[in-house]
Amino acid sequence: MSITDVSTQVERTLQKAAGAATATSPLTAVRTVRARTARLVGVLTLVALLATLPFAMHWAGPAFAVDYGLIVAMCVLAISVLGWIGEISLAPVAQMGFGVVAVNVCQVHDIPFGFTLPIVALASLPISLLLAAFTLRLKGVSFAIATLAFAYMAHKTFFLEYLGTYGAFGGSGTRQVVRPSFVRTDESFYYLELAVLLAMVLLCYSIHRSRIGARFTALRESEMAFATLGHPPAAYRFFAICLSGAIATVAGALFVYLQLQVPSNLLLPGQAVLFFGYAVAGGLGSIGGAIAAGAVFGAIPKYLETLTKSGFLTYDLFVIGLVVFIVMMKAPGGLAEIGRKVWRRIEGAPTGGSAA
Amino acid sequence: MSGNGSAGGRSGGAVLPNRLTPIGLRRGLEVMAAWGRDGTDPSGFEQFRLEPFRTWPGAAEAVWYRPEDGRFAEPTEVLVVEGLSLRFGGVQALVGVDLRARTGEVTGVIGPNGAGKSTLFNCLSGLLTPDAGRVTFHGTSLTGAPALRARRGLGRTFQTPRLFKSLSVLDNLLFGCETADWSGHRYVFDTRLGRLTHAERAEEIARLVGFRGDLATPAAALPFGDLRTVELARALCGAPSLLMLDEPASGLDTEQADRFVGLMSSLAAMGLAILLIEHDMALVMELCRRITVLDFGQVIATGTPDEVQRDDAVIRAYLGRGTGGHPRGERSGARA
């Protein structure tokens, strides 16, 4: 049996699992045409939407909202990556903080913008190494609490001093950064963020679909079996921590470019709990869910803030909490599960089948 | 591991020397022949029964088999455990356990529940670190993380099958194949497997252990018997030279258990060393050449099935310590 034969078998079984009828059935042919059309229309709509979003949403508010949504999506993606190995990280906000610091350092040393993001991504490695030193042998709640402890230590010992508090808590000012000229406006900055997010999504997607992704799944499901099959769990855990850290750190870098200044009080470690809530509501481990969470919990509240002339700020966390609550009640798999169901309905496939 | 099985010489008339013929091999061959008769396998197991080493290429290409003289190599000691001890807080889980496993043999590890059998396996596979004792594997000390031990040729299954349930059967098997490539070990029971692609190898081994389903099936959708079969196949995909099986026959029906006996006999005949924990005494007695009996973490008897069955300490451990003979632990022995 060749690889091709096995692939065909896999495809056939997936079709069976999805409840699809045989290929010769007219119903299947109609469904296939419908699914292809839906896919084409869906992709075109998505591309059009992404290409024009900051302008198309001008009626609801400035492009800052959607820019912020993309940052939230990146942070949630960082949490989701650790979800692949079954761990909960409460360190992404701290890792974002290191991204903020790295951008400041780059600016102080007049490093060109083109090098800044790669440097930030590389700078995340020693931080991830440090975090891994704390957490590599921990699992579950212990892992989550250790990452939170790491975040508090980073905040108290480093961010408060280096980034300042912009006058809050009796502290001093903060450091400013300057955006490069080609992304001076929030609209143009959106395209930079979008490109970075797409790169992250492609990277994560290709990893998730590869054998490394299968190993992450195996590690999550039975670390004992994984290890006794000759695969070192620590190596894969470390890789996931590094990947997650790089995403969060780059998100932090973009955050400071968006805000132009990020005092340490915007990087409170407790914020990570909120982001974790977004990740769960988005669908922990799901790449699409992370992007949806960015839109629902990042961009939309900012637009509502503008539309209500900041009146929404009084209720924002209540409304967000309510949305998380409803999503969890209706779809334990989060926004990703809702998205899959809707998509299957559009494609005309039975909704009870497995996800595509 | 001695022997040279790489040559393509499948010389006919291969003779199994009696001293090396594992108990149950004949039955194993018969069972495998029966599989061929139900039309599921085209490779002619009826002939296999008559001329196994002409018909089944894998049989003639076992590392342990020497085609030049049509004989198996001398069995060698793969695993030597000396004085292994482990304490969990106030509980002494293992007390100076000694154990040996040789190529071409199934070695049984039996004992009542809580005797320390699975703990022993966990120590050997590196999941637990013993407090004292020495483990030698292929002549060198066996230490390090479970992954390193697996890459040295130590394969195992678990009491409760631990398949990666959201992955397909094929994906599960590929984990073993990857390990085999990383370690560079040959498949003791069929060297030609190493020349196949991962997917082909997985398919061959799945069929060898009797998995008849679709390799693309998610493991979560498998019935219990298939979970055990696939877990065994996954362990074999890793090209182990020592296979440790933790209650592999529990939950299997009579037919599946018969197949299992046949398969184990055949794998052992091809040169694999097998350590077997099992509560089904009839199966153990049929399959194992030597048996080590544990009770409260200590070895209370070691010997051939006949010796062990006559041992007073073993009888006491299984029937109870008092003269009243209250049953202690379970006794299955349901298979006649």
Image: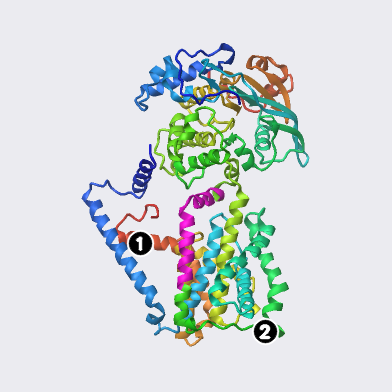
Q: Secondary structure at mark 1?
A: helix
Look at label 2 and name its amino acid: Ala
| Alpha carbons under labels 1 and 2: distance apart | 46 Å
User: Quadrant of residue B43 in the image?
Assistant: top left
Specify the principal SS of the magenta part.
Answer: helix
Disc 1 marks a residue whose amino acid type is Trp
Instruction: Residue A151: name its quadrant.
Output: bottom right
Does residue A55 belong to the magenta stretch? no
Q: Chain of mark 1?
A: A
Q: Residue furthest bottom?
A: A309
Residue picked out by circle 2:
A168
Looking at the image, residue B301 lies above or below residue B206: above
Nearer-the-camera pick, A167 or A130: A130
Classify B303 as above or below A352.
Answer: above
**Residue B179 pos. (x, y %):** 55, 40
Q: x and y percent of residue A153 in the render?
A: 71, 69
The stretch drawn in magenta includes residue A215: yes
Quarter of the image for the N terminus of chain B: give it: top right
| Residue A220 pos. (x, y %) | 55, 51
A8 sits to left or right of B13: left
Chain of the residue displaying label 2: A
- Report the front residue among B116 and B185: B185
Q: What range is drawn magenta here?
A: A194-219
Q: Position of residue A126 (x, y in %)?
A: 65, 63
Q: Which residue is mark 1?
A: A343
State yes or no: discs 1 and 2 in contact (Cβ < 8 Å). no
Dot 1 or dot 2: first in sequence order is 2
For label 2, the crowd category at 10 Å Cα-Cα, with few meaning under 14, some 14 to 19 and many 20 or more, is: few
In this view of the protein, can residue B260 be seen by the observer?
yes
Q: Could you tell me which residue is drawn at 49 percent across and 63 percent down?
A: A328
Determine the secondary structure under disc 2. helix
